[in-house]
Amino acid sequence: EPEVTQTPSHQVTQMGQEVILRCVPISNHLYFYWYRQILGQKVEFLVSFYNNEISEKSEIFDDQFSVERPDGSNFTLKIRSTKLEDSAMYFCASSEGQGQETQYFGPGTRLLVL
Amino acid sequence: AQKVTQAQTEISVVEKEDVTLDCVYETRDTTYYLFWYKQPPSGELVFLIRRNSFDEQNEISGRYSWNFQKSTSSFNFTITASQVVDSAVYFCALRNNNAGNMLTFGGGTRLMVKP
């Protein structure tokens, strides 16, 4: 069964450093998403991406964040200058379409900013 | 605006007990979609079920069943004869038809099933 994959599974970085989180969505899916979950809290939407552009983003997704689909398979989230409060689990998701289509999540990348 | 409330932050049961996880949602849209996801201790989010606002039929899948009631804006999840492997955090989520593609999640319910 096809699944969303994410690398790395864990990342530790120093405050102020740039990090890139990588995702490979399910191959026939057209919509891609990033969510984050601060430890012990709810899952929060960051951004959705379709047709090589951002379709919507939340207030959390400020200028420090960017997304890219550098090739036909990868979907990345970059945090330019990490802060302590960026420590969280970051989930990538994809869906075949929009509307009622289910978003399938990857296993997550646990980011720790020191 | 949309909101999902899971009032039970933590539930503990003994194996073989039935347990119901509550989910109450708020939305102004008439067309929306409801989801349940399971987050086991390993951390991934596993899709369990999707429901459309115009389909109020309850659903059963093995030991899992879902009760969708528009009149009370609730989409509750029942596990029958719980097992230790059911121990996880369960999230209810909502997507409005007119609010883009974002999922709004509830705070989650941590279910602990003891042997």
Image: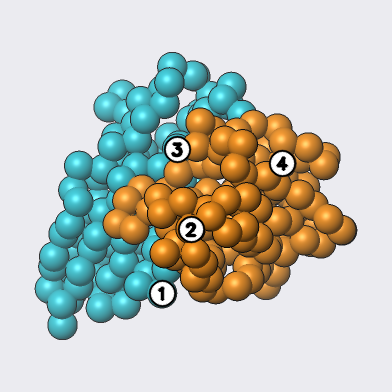
Chain colours: A orange, B cyan
Instruction: Tell me the SS state at disc 2.
Output: loop
Q: Mark 4 points at which residue?
A: A49
Amino acid type shown at disc 2: Met
Residue closer to the observer: B113 or B61: B113
- Tell me the CA gap for discs 1 and 2: 26 Å
Q: Mark 3 points at which residue?
A: B104
The chain ID associated with circle 4 is A
| Mark 1 burial class by Cα count in 10 Å: few <14, some 14-19, many 20+ | few
Q: Is residue B71 left or right of residue A4?
A: left
Instruction: Tell me the SS state at disc 4.
Output: strand
| Mark 3 burial class by Cα count in 10 Å: few <14, some 14-19, many 20+ | many
Residue closer to the observer: B38 or B43: B43
| Mark 2 burial class by Cα count in 10 Å: few <14, some 14-19, many 20+ | some
Q: Are marks 2 and 3 in contact (CB under 8 Å)?
A: no
- Residue shown at the point (28%, 37%) measured from the top left: B5
Q: Mark 1 points at which residue?
A: B42
Judge if badges 3 and 4 mark residues of a common chain: no
Q: Is residue B110 left or right of residue A99?
A: left
- Tell me the CA gap for discs 3 and 4: 17 Å
Amino acid type shown at disc 4: Phe
- Residue shown at the point (62%, 44%) measured from the top left: A65
The chain ID associated with circle 3 is B
